Image (tube, rainbow, N blue to C red):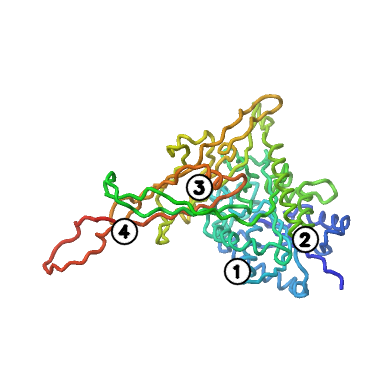
Amino acid sequence: MAKQKRLVVLVHGWSVRNTDTYGGLPQRLKLEAKRSPDLDIEVRNLWLSEYISFHNEVTIPDIARAFQTALERELGEAIKNGQRIACIAHSTGCPVIRAWLQHFYINAGRKHSPLSHLIMLAPANFGSALVQLGLSKLSRLKAWFEGVDVGTGVLEWLELGSPQSLKLNLEWLQQGADYIGSQGLFPFVLSGESHDPQLYDFVNSYTAENGSDGVVRVAAANLNYTYVRLKQQPPTADKKSKLGFSAPLLQAGAPEISAAVPLAVIPGVCHSDLRMGIMRSIPADATPNATVTGILQCLRVTTLKDYAELFDSFRAQTAEVQQQEQVEDRGSLGPFDHQVIVDPCCMLIFRVRDDQGNAIKDFDIVLTAGKDNSPNHLPPGFFIDRQRNHLDPGTITYYLNYTRMLGGPAVMYKGRQLRPALPPCDGLGLRVVPYPQDGFVLYQPATLKATAVNLRNFIKPNQTTIVDIVMRRILREGVYRLTQNPSPQDFTKQPPGMPIN
C-alpha cells in the first residue's frame, strides 16, 4: 500500500476576515509540490482556516475546541485512515493550534497526533506588546486590522504575561520534549524583525521596536525559553531592622530549559502586510522567497536527525540575518541621516507570588549588577520596555537589549563607526521590594546577588525567561493569641509581635 501524502492546513491570525491573508502561499505550495515530489504533501485540496477571533466572547480555548470539531467534520475519515497533517499557522493561529494540541493530545496522554508538522510564522507564543495600547488604538493599526472589531477574549490571552499563555508554555516546558518526533510532531518557528516604513506609527514605538516585526517580538515568538524559580529564605532575627527581623535573600533553583525548537529569523519581512508580511507577501509564482525556502526546509524534516540538523542550520541563518540587518537605515523617511542599530533582545517575565499562592500586586523589581548589587552598574541603554499584565498585576514583563547586557563588537556602517565595542555587564541580580512591609501580615524585601551565572541563565538572545518569584508571607504572632484571663480586655492595640512559622 502506497504511503499517504500529508494534508496541508493553513491557519490565519487574529482579526482576519478574508482568506486573502494567505497571499500566494496556497498556490505556491501547489507549485512547489509539483516541482519537488519529495515534499510528500497533498496539495490538490488545501484546507484554509476561517475562524472567528473578533467577537469579544470568543477565546483561544474556544477556537481550539472548534478546530477539533472542524477537523472531525472535514478530515475525520482521512485521519482515521492514518493520514497526517502539516499545519502552517500565522501569528495568533499558532497559539490556537498549540492550545488544541495540548488539550486534545498532550494533556490527554495521546502520543500519536494527526499533526506531523507545525510551522509557525511570526507566532505570538508569548503574546504581543501591542495589546496594551487599548482597543481604539489597535483598531487603527494597519499591521493587524482591516475595519473589524477586535476580540477582547483573544486579546486577554495575547497580553504579555497572561496566565493563559504562561500556562500553555509551562505545560510545553514539562511535556514538549517527549512529544517531538515522527510519532508526535515537529514544530518550527519562522519570524522576522524588519519593519515596513509605510506601517510606522510615530507615536507608538512598538510598531518599529528593536527585535520585533512590528507586532511580535522574536523573543515572544521563539519556543526556546527558560524557567527559573526564586524563593525567599525564611525570616531571621535582625537587630538592624526596626521590626526585629528580616528575610534578605532569594535563592535560585536550577534553570529548566524547554525542548529545542528550530528558530529562523527571515530576512526582510514584517508581521502581516501585503508588501513585506511574512505570509501575505509570499508570491504565487516561483519567485525566490526566503519564507517559502524556510517552509520547504521544515516540510522535508522526517526524523529527529533531520530536525537537529535544521535547528543548527536555522541558528546559523538567524545569526547571519541579524548581522546583515544590524543597521536599519531610516534616512529615506525624512531629510536627516538616521540609522538605527538593531540588536538581539530578550524578555523576562516575572510572576511574583507568596508562599501561600497569593499574587503580590504591589511590588518593585530592580535589576542589579556588580559586586555591590547596584542598578547603577547596569549598562546604559539595556532597558527597552516594561509591561504589567492588567488582569494579573502580579506579573510583569521586562524587555531588554541582549547585546547591551552581554557585550558585542563595534558596529560599522558605510565605513564609519556607529557604536564602539560594548563590554559585558558585570553579572546580574535583582531586588524585589514587595508591599505592605508592616502590619500583622507583611512582606520583606529580598535580593538575588548579582553573578555571572545569573546573567547567563536569565539573558539569552531572542528568548524569553519566565521567572517565578516566591516571597514569604510573614504572619506575626499577634494575629491570634490565647488567654486564660477571664476579665474583659481590649486586644485591638496589642503589638503584632515576631513572625511565626
Q: Which mark is residue 214?
A: none
Relative to 151, is 398 above or below?
above
Q: x and y percent of residue 161 in the render?
A: 53, 53
Quarter of the rendering containing residue 461: top right
Image position, residue 54 (x, y; %): 61, 58
Q: Quick one: SS at disc 2?
A: loop
Which element carries disc 4, helix, strand or loop? strand
Give the label on residue 302, or none. Answer: 2
Q: Tell me if residue 227 can be seen.
A: yes
Answer yes or no: is residue 15 visible: no
Q: Nearer the viewer, mark 3 or mark 1?
A: 1
Q: Earlier in the sequence, mark 3 or mark 4?
A: 3
Chain-order first, disc 1 or disc 2: 1
Q: Are marks 3 and 4 in contact (CB under 8 Å)?
A: no
- Give the residue type at disc 2: Thr
- Determine contact: label 3, label 1, CB under 8 Å: no
- Give coordinates of residue 179: x percent, y percent: 66, 64
> Amino acid type of disc 1?
Asn
**Cα–Cα gap, marks 2 and 3:** 40 Å
